[in-house]
Image (cartoon, rainbow, N blue to C red):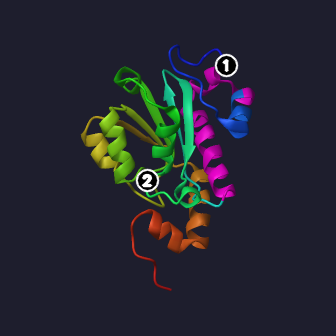
Amino acid sequence: MASILPGLRRRPFGPILASVMCEKGIEAMSDDTRTRLVPAIQAARAGAASGGIPIGSALFIDGALVATGHNRRVQDGSVIHHAEMNCLENAGRLPAADYARATLVTTLSPCDMCTGAVLLYGIPRVVIGENRTFLGGEDLLRSRGVDVTVLDDPECVEMMTAFIATHPALWAEDIGENEPTP
């Protein structure tokens, strides 16, 4: 993994991300926006497999993968560990100059909390897998100069559609809404 940025410490990404890196290579990921979504999707699937909400995120700096994360609200009993927040936590403390060269990739449109983190750290680019099942703070990001790309990825749509259909109360809790009535 020689392509990790100098000065950034290595983070343990685990077997899921390791398989992506071995299969594609970090350099290959930097060439294609869709390919950058792969580690976020795999993180989302890992989150679902561990009993959580299937939303994943990946942070790239200068095209190099720095960290991934997934929604851990259920697993940790956390009110803040959405996928994007967990990814930023996994990246560790970074200087503002690194965030200024970053792209945050997420399987789902970021909520207001995660949108605020993007703005706080000055991340200039956000790639979103899908926004059909949830539309977050995209307009706010754009109004503040963030380059927002929505891929409308069928795999991301299917993951969230299936989850929402089978866990409507948990989904409502995650996005701060009242439980749906039957």
What mark, if any, has residue 83 been given in the picture?
A: none
Instruction: Name the residue rendered at 50%, 86% in the picture.
Output: 182
Look at the numbered disc 2 and give the secondary structure of its residue: loop
Q: Mark 2 points at which residue?
A: 80
Q: Which amino acid does label 2 sit on?
A: Ile
Q: Residue at x 56, y 43 (%)?
A: 69
Pick the front one: 30 or 180: 180
First in sequence: mark 2 or mark 1?
Answer: 1
- Image spot of residue 134 (x, y percent): 44, 59
Q: Range of the magenta residues?
A: 22-50
Q: Nearer the viewer, residue 20 or 113?
A: 113
Type of amino acid at the residue the image marks with label 1: Met
Up-down relation of residue 167 to residue 7 (above or below): below
The residue at which mark 1 appears reads as 1
Are the residues tagged 2 and 1 within 8 Å (C-beta)? Answer: no
Q: Nearer the viewer, mark 2 or mark 1?
A: 2
In percent of width and height, residue 142 lies at: 30, 41
